[in-house]
Image (tube, rainbow, N blue to C red):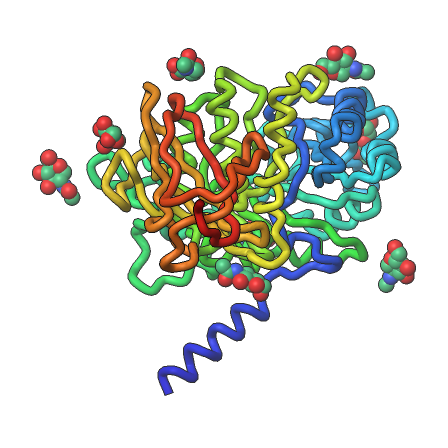
Amino acid sequence: MQKSISIAVLLVQAAQALVLKDGVGKLPALGWNTWNAFGCNINETNILTAANQIVKLGLKDAGYEYVNIDDCWAVKSGRDNVTGQIIPDPTKFPSGIIGVANQVHALGLKVGIYGSAGTETCGGYPAQIGHEYLDAATFAAWGIDYFKYDNCYVPANWTDEYVACVPDQWQTYGPYINGTCKASSSDAPPGYNWATSNTANRYAIMRDALLAQNRTILYSLCEWGQADVEVWGNATGSSWRMSGDITPWWARVAEIMNENSFLLNSVNFWGHNDADMLEIGNGNLTLAESRSHFAFWAAMKSPLIIGTNLATLPSTHVDILKNKYLLAFSQDKVHGAPATPYKWGTNPDWTFNATNPAEYWSGQSTGGILALALNTLDTPAEREIKWDEVPHLTPGGKAFMVTDVWTGKSLGCVKRGIKTLVQSHDTIGYMIGEKCSHK
Ligand SMILES: *[C@@H]1O[C@H](CO)[C@@H](O)[C@H](O)[C@H]1NC(C)=O
Ligand SMILES: *[C@@H]1O[C@H](CO)[C@@H](O)[C@H](O)[C@H]1NC(C)=O
Ligand SMILES: *[C@@H]1O[C@H](CO)[C@@H](O)[C@H](O)[C@H]1NC(C)=O
Ligand SMILES: *[C@@H]1O[C@H](CO)[C@@H](O)[C@H](O)[C@H]1NC(C)=O
Ligand SMILES: *[C@@H]1O[C@H](CO)[C@@H](O)[C@H](O)[C@H]1NC(C)=O
Ligand SMILES: *[C@@H]1O[C@H](CO)[C@@H](O)[C@H](O)[C@H]1NC(C)=O
Ligand SMILES: *[C@@H]1O[C@H](CO)[C@@H](O)[C@H](O)[C@H]1NC(C)=O
Ligand SMILES: *[C@@H]1O[C@H](CO)[C@@H](O)[C@H](O)[C@H]1NC(C)=O
């Protein structure tokens, strides 16, 4: 009896998952967004420049497809008082959002837009709560393919009864114990179903509004990991942020990676933890840090949304974004699960630590087993990937065919494992293939 009940529950949950047409949302989204590069300083010109750069730099051929307009695209003072629609800022967008969308589509790319499940967007522009169906219809009419839904200016009657702790927001939202909060701590009574929370409901209304349109619109939740979104995200959107905003320096990249490393059970086909948009090209990230940022965002199967000015991005960084082994892992059509840590390295296994997250990771893919080793220390250090520690490798295998994911070079048949000096905050990565016999 107990068994048949749990099977029924599983079937209901699977049926509720958001599965869109044409495979949209099945794999982590690949694209570009205005925010990390330009903030509110956006217009038709810099968006179309980015779209053209995506084509010119070979990023489109590598799989990047979404060109996403973030906050500050609308007239701030209010909606059209006849139609009730949000009005695109005519100075920033002389051809309207529809004009930009047409030009982006003409390049063979898709276009995204931004809103908030509150009364205003984070920048203070008109937002969706109470206008979900009208706005979804407007976005569909403009040709929008991707909608990012932020979490600012939530009206008082829509806040949640309880709080589930997001580690990077404990100071603001609690609950916390002596200055730290565990990935899953909450003040809700045991067994409370977060799928019934006001936050889950706010995001479900917009899902239904988007689904009511005659257009496939990928739905990207941006509620900062609150209200235990990992529980209901798969039924609501194609991806959901699991943390507060990223910033372009290593400490924050490592902090988000640490948080997400404890939440990866909720990632598979059709539903992905969003570790936030990429900062490669921004702030003070070194080349080594940029490599690690990209490798782990791809390995965790986060959406990969570029957030830099592509007109000035050095080719070293473009090459990271185009890494074919990591993109193939992210976009694998057969294996939906992300890579996960198999050993923490610097810290004991399962240590929750913002500065020194898990260092040794592996995951299964069509191209082989991806193994990564990160040096979280501030100085160079040796890291060793030992075949007999890596999950998924053929048990008893003593030697395997190995390709370095950064150089693309085959290392041939490698016995036992690989030990090498790794720069501070850099990551070594290998695609491990067939068993072989070492001569
Ligand atoms: C668009 O914004 C950029 C800054 O990001 C600015 O340099 C440019 O003049 C603007 N173009 C128009 C047409 O407003
Ligand atoms: C409608 O909006 C326009 C422009 O924002 C404004 O000039 C006009 O007074 C408004 N009309 C009404 C009836 O509110
Ligand atoms: C909050 O108030 C609005 C406006 O009255 C209403 O439409 C909405 O249903 C309320 N939200 C909740 C959770 O009751
Ligand atoms: C918090 O820290 C204080 C002082 O170190 C300790 O006495 C207390 O037991 C801690 N509380 C919890 C819930 O860990
Ligand atoms: C939906 O859109 C397609 C093409 O965009 C069109 O062929 C179809 O008739 C539309 N369906 C409805 C119900 O409007
Ligand atoms: C999310 O839903 C999809 C579609 O039903 C399913 O394939 C996937 O396994 C679900 N993800 C998780 C982590 O259960
Ligand atoms: C990078 O910038 C952040 C924020 O300004 C700062 O805290 C950090 O020390 C900087 N890191 C380096 C290596 O300069
Ligand atoms: C995180 O791990 C490092 C390395 O072991 C350690 O030095 C640091 O104290 C840890 N941080 C916390 C907050 O425990």
Q: Residue at x 44, y 47 (%)?
A: 438
Q: Is residue 223 visible?
A: no
> What x and y, as percent, mark residue 278?
56, 31
> What x and y, as percent, mark residue 12?
53, 73
Q: Residue at x 79, y 39 (%)?
A: 109
Pick whichever, 404 or 9, lies toward us.
404
Pick whichever, 273 or 392, lies toward us.
392
Quadrant of the image where one finds ligand 8: top left
Where is the N terminus found, in terms of image quarters? bottom left
> What x and y, as percent, mark residue 219?
64, 49
Q: Is residue 68 left or right of residue 402?
A: right
Q: Quadrant of residue 63?
A: top right
Q: Is residue 40 left or right of residue 180?
A: right
Q: Residue at x 61, y 34 (%)?
A: 323
Q: Is residue 271 left or right of residue 143?
A: left
**417 in relation to 69, above or below:** below
Q: Quadrant of residue 53?
A: top right
Where is the C terminus found, in terms of image quarters? top left
> What x and y, as percent, mark residue 324?
63, 38
How many numbered discs, if any?
0
Pick whichever, 122 or 43, lies toward us.
43
Q: Is residue 43 left or right of residue 229?
A: right
Residue extending furthest toward the bottom:
1
Q: Is residue 190 visible?
A: yes
Pick whichever, 209 or 256, lies toward us.
256
Residue extending furthest toward the front:
439
